[in-house]
Amino acid sequence: MASTCTILHGSPKETPGTIVISPQTGKILSVHTSILPPSEFPPGTTYIDYTPKVIMPGLVDAHVHLNEPGWRTEWEGFETGTRAAAFGGVTTLIDMPLNAIPPTTTVENFDLKISAARGQCWVDVGFYGGVIPGNEDELVALVERGVKGFKCFLIESGVEEFPPVSTEDVKTAMEKLRDQPTVLMFHAEMIPPLAMSVGDSVLHGDPPLAPSGALNSYSTFLDSRPPAFETYAIENVINLASTAPNLPLHIVHLSAVEGLPLLSAARERGVNITAETCFHYLALTAEDIKDGDTRHKCCPPIREGRNQEGLWEALKAGEIVTVVSDHSPCTPDLKLFSKGDFFQAWGGVSTIGLGLSVLWTEGRPRGITLGDISRWTAYATAKQVGLLGQKGALEAGWDADVCIFDPEASFKVTQSEMHFKNKVTPYEDKTLNGVVKETWLRGKRIYSSECGFVVDAGPQGELLLGKRKNTGGIQAIPVGALPFN
């Protein structure tokens, strides 16, 4: 062991531990489930004692909209979005194919995305591709270029450059991707054949023909997007699964618990399908959303408290395997605060950098451990995007991506804690428990709560462009894979 190795040492309640890191390679050299004293290492070795804080794997946020390149970069971009991620202990994020212009639906567009991202990223960044009508001949080439999966919409996305797919489009995409190392993901909302509402598009649109109340009332918006939107879409995805039986399928941002029995029954029949949920569905409830507070608008919608408890139970039971931010920002004017119209306002919740504290605040009273949270937000998300062996756990030979977390501290969310570009979030003025004290990326400290961001070195994030190797689903995640939580 070279004298230039860095030793991160801490003693959380569950498991004392020592991690040996090589700053030259950015890898973890060894992991010990005991506290090794400084005398165990050569003179001159950097030794940092983090007791009693917790040493955690850096989070892997597998659902983020950074919107660059194009004019929507004013909503969010690589520099601001990845800086916000580092503030919250996120060391890897995966960028969605929309709302950048152009979207990541062709190799040419992907190259533009890569050029825009270079030199701007504070954390490591991977990319998803998109499935839209007519781009089936680009899909395999995008896999070869290194996209980590594909997303499609089964309902209007709200942006014209990313239209929804039909049943035939999905079948064609499945046939193209059936033998590829990838995952096909679905925004699973569809308007059922018989519905009280025609619904609106995902991000903004006209109200239903027969709204149940005032357009600035959250209950009116919630009524317009009932659980049947999600269950109808999930049923359609499951019915198409036989087109490519080995292709992993994934439901993004599940909000309605009514979809869970459908997914469970499908898995029992051998369908390779999983689901994620989001921080906001686990922390915010429809009953608490005031009239006109369009910061809470997203699709699928934030539902009632009883639904939220069902999501927590599904996480505990392993029925939902990952938790992500779905950070989907916009400029304040698009939230239409003066009108408070939940239908015309842009949809999306800004959360990146706050998610770990949000989960700890809500999860700890429910008996959730930091090991559970790491499993949902690091190990399982890394597996979902084909990065296990590099990201998602504190293991020898893996990237030394580390979050130092103080579970006993707390902070109030003010604009100084919002490092994303536009300071609009429903968490503003809320007190969150648990504070990220430091974030390390590949063996280098990039953020600390005391000194801020390490700006002298500049953004150190890498673009994760290698073709993914594994094709399996993301069930059966071993608890022992996270030794320091």
Image (cartoon, rainbow, N blue to C red):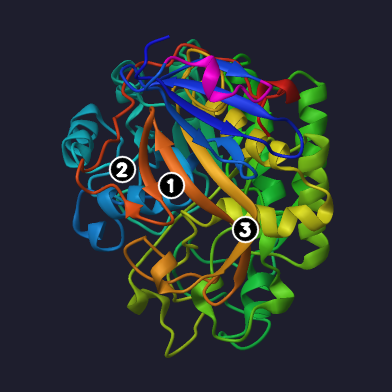
| Other-residue count near label 2 (Cα within 10 Å), few / some / many at <14 / 14–19 / ≥20 | many
Amino acid carrying mark 3 in the image: Val
> Image check: 215 left or right of 91?
right
Q: Which mark is residue 64?
A: 1
Pointer 3 residue: 358
What residue lies at 57% left-to-right and 77% top-to-bottom? 209
Q: Which residues are the magenta region? A: 33-42
Q: Nearer the viewer, residue 8 or 240?
A: 8
Q: Quadrant of the N terminus?
A: top left
Amino acid carrying mark 2 in the image: Trp
Disc 3 or disc 1, which is closer to the eye? 3
What is the CA distance from the residue labelled 1 to the residue labelled 2? 14 Å
What is the CA distance from the residue labelled 2 to the residue labelled 3? 22 Å
Dot 3 or dot 1: first in sequence order is 1
Q: Quadrant of the C terminus?
A: top right
Pointer 2 residue: 122
SS assignment at label 1: strand
> Image check: 91 left or right of 266?
left
| Other-residue count near label 1 (Cα within 10 Å), few / some / many at <14 / 14–19 / ≥20 | many
